[in-house]
Amino acid sequence: MKKNEIPDIPVKFASDALVFCDWIDTTNFITIGGRGVAKSTVIIARRSIRCVRLMPGAPIAIVADTYSNLINNIMPAVQNGWKIDGLIEGVHYVKYKRPPLDWQRRCSVIVDDYKHVFSFWNGSVILLGSLDNPSLLAGKSVAHLIFDEAKYASDSKASRVMPILRGDAITYGRCHLYGGVTITTDMPDVTEGEYDWFFRYASEMDPERIIRIIQASGELNRLQLNLARANHENIPDIKKIAKIEKRIAYYTEGLLKLRKGQTFFMNISSFVNIDILTVDYAKRLYAGALELHEFLKSVMGMRPGVSKDARFYVLFGEKHKYIDGTTSGVAAFASTELRYLNPSAPIDGGMDFGNMLSLVIGQSDGTRYRVHKNFYEIPPGWFRELADQFLTFFSSHKFKTLNLYYDRSGNNFQKQGEDYAGKIKEAIEKDASNRRTGWTVILKSRKQSTIKQHAEYDFMHELMRGENDRLPKLLVDALNCPEMISSIEGAKAEVKYRGPQKIVAKVKKTEKLGAKKLPRLSTNFSDAFKYLMMRREWLNATKTNQISLSNAAELAGEWMNNYFGD
């Protein structure tokens, strides 16, 4: 046995998730966790019982997506966590029934119906609620809110739940858990109708404060071990014990102040619990139990794109990206930092006018065509703000000509001088003070017809295949076009029918997302990219390619049959 080990103090395994939960324990604690992380058994169980112990008599709420999921899946796992922590049903708590009278007297609120309530020995109660039965928590007031399966709650539904978080500040306000939230879920996929409103808590986290909390918790843990060792000496040193206890009290009080009002946000994969799950569990999921797309989301905790076999731009891949576009290795702040941009040649732009303004900039590079940079403006920003971004970035560009390709809707009201294409041209050619900037914008889509989605699918299939010598080799700067790449990779395909003919179309529902989500998650940037690439000369090149359009149609039909069925 190692020196200083104490035989009668049990040593228990703790996953990283449990250590984070116990050591950091801030007022707000948000966890996005992969499968098998034990979000209910560890995080919800330990946070809830800590609320019970530190705020005796307080009302606490646990909310989930549906009530059946809450009582059939979540709460049994939470109870198992309580059992591991030493709590026994019938001794320390009762559920769904009126508790003993002395328990009721210790409760700080009046509970009329115990049908959806867990009651504890010290008067604390946990009220159960769900999104499908909001009346359960109507009019309630709680000191701490626990929210599981948060990805199924829309922003509006979450906003309706949060107001119950008020409690009794006079009685419980000193506790660092008072007024806080515990949110657990697995990684949401907004393209599948799930929600990510809880990501806003990430920006509230103070990393420096979290580090100090961990350091203080580590020191407190060390002092508690020293105290246990000192108490187990054959002849305990009373002065030494008193000194350690004083230090423990100091760090305990300090941690209370450090944790209070703070937020911790973590995204953890299933591998934090791999010692229990085993590597074979992960291998089984990877080998076939889950598709790669689902594995990356549900196990690895990666924010999902669209499964490759369901993408509209099905052939877009790593071969089309490069990461050495700037000498610094980070995104450029000015065009002079772009390694492959020719400052003595004109540049091209592709623009989409939608719920946001999307602009992508490209330039020919011999047999290659490089997309160098993307810009966007979301409301309330508009043409002036987008033009200012462009002018600032390309202020040192010598050949000040921009060939602009855009959606034909940009020509609407051209005769009245209110067309969008004309407005962005004017905003680039003249600054906010109406002075000439030296730039000339050539509008290349004045007589453009509508580009059909099935035509785009055929063209992009051939462009990205890279086998047509009359088309350039596509290359995209991954450092400076992250939003455009995300939009392309996130664009989903769907099957539509034109009479008996089956065609592939782009799903456009993402363009109705909230403004802040549009740059990376909507198809707007992919449309700006479409207008940049689908110019007349390259469209004509597809008509004489060795792989004919009829063959491309056959390829499209084969792809649809494989992934969509008949």
Image: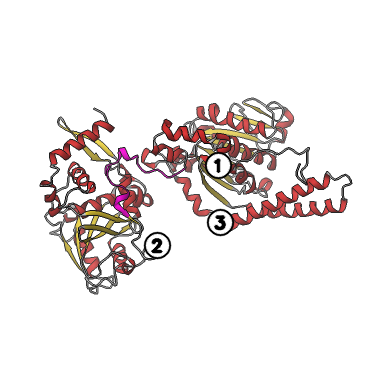
- Tag 3 near tag 1, CB within 8 Å: no
Q: In this view, does 292 lie above or below 72?
A: below
Quarter of the rendering occupied by the C terminus: top left
User: Outermost residue, bottom direction?
Assistant: 435
**524 and 459: which is toward the camera:** 459
**384 and 33: which is toward the camera:** 33
Q: Residues within 10 Å of mark 3 (few under 14, many from 20)?
A: few
Earlier in the chain: of badge 3 and badge 1, it is 3
The type of residue carrying mark 2 is: Gly
The type of residue carrying mark 1 is: Val
| Front label number (2 vs 3) | 2
**459 and 339: which is toward the camera:** 339
Q: Which mark is residue 272?
A: 1
Q: Residue 159 in magenta?
A: no
Q: Can residue 352 be seen in this view?
A: no
Q: Which residue is drawn at 60% across and 56% down?
A: 211
Q: Which mark is residue 329?
A: 2
The type of residue carrying mark 3 is: Pro
Q: Distance between the residues labelled 1 and 2?
A: 31 Å
Q: For numbered disc 3, what is the local secondary structure? A: helix
Q: Residue 207 carries which label?
A: 3
Earlier in the chain: of badge 1 and badge 2, it is 1
Task: State the extent of the magenta-drawn residues as a range.
Answer: 301-321
Q: Where is residue 324 in the image (x, y as percent from the top left)?
A: 35, 60
- Tag 2 near tag 3, CB within 8 Å: no
